[in-house]
Amino acid sequence: MRGDAALTRAFGVLGKRWSGVVLGNLGLGPAGFRELARATGGVSDSVLSDRLSELTKAGLITRAVDAGPPVSVSYELTPSGQALIPALQQIAQWAEEHLPPESS
């Protein structure tokens, strides 16, 4: 398959737990750390912080600090991150149609 190296790079970032969920939530608009933590439900603060740093480093999201008061931080998709949303939606649809439901 052509593009193996590109897929490997993409899933190196996207294949980490919570990355897709974070991107999907930011596809709805900018959000702060607490908003993302609530929206992802179940991710620890340290893992969420790691994912946000990784996605920022990958150029998929930006981090903006508002000096306040109070100081606040928000995250937003970059154009590259926005371009990924349709693919994430297609993956979600594929999963609904082809993967068995998770057991509780």
Image (cartoon, rainbow, N blue to C red):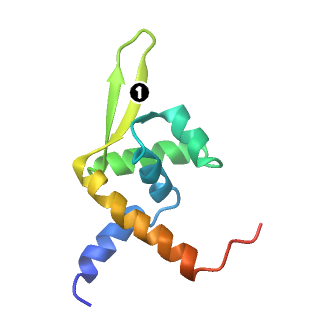
Q: On the image, which quarter does residue 74 sit in?
A: top left
Percent x, y of residue 59: 26, 50
Q: Is residue 9 left or right of residue 37?
A: left
Percent x, y of residue 41: 63, 47
Q: Is residue 15 left or right of residue 55?
A: right
Q: Is residue 99 above or below residue 87?
A: below
Q: Which residue: 42% across, 44% down?
A: 28
Q: Nearer the viewer, residue 79 or 67?
A: 79
- How many marks the image carries: the answer is 1
Q: Give amino acid for label 1.
A: Val
Q: Nearer the viewer, residue 97 or 49?
A: 97
Q: Which residue: 24% across, 54% down?
A: 80
For label 1, the crowd category at 10 Å Cα-Cα, with few meaning under 14, some 14 to 19 and many 20 or more, is: some
Quarter of the figure with the N terminus: bottom left
**Residue projecting furthest to the top:** 69
Q: Secondary structure at mark 1?
A: strand
Percent x, y of residue 8: 32, 75
- The residue singled out by tag 1 in the image is 73
Q: Nearer the viewer, residue 64 or 91?
A: 91
Q: Is residue 40 above or below residue 34?
A: below
Q: Which residue: 39% across, 40% down?
A: 29
**Residue projecting furthest to the bottom:** 1
Percent x, y of residue 82: 29, 52
Q: Is residue 11 left or right of residue 44?
A: left
Q: Is residue 102 above or below residue 56?
A: below
Quarter of the figure with the C terminus: bottom right
- Whether residue 45 is visible, yes or no, is no
- Whether residue 34 is visible, yes or no, is yes
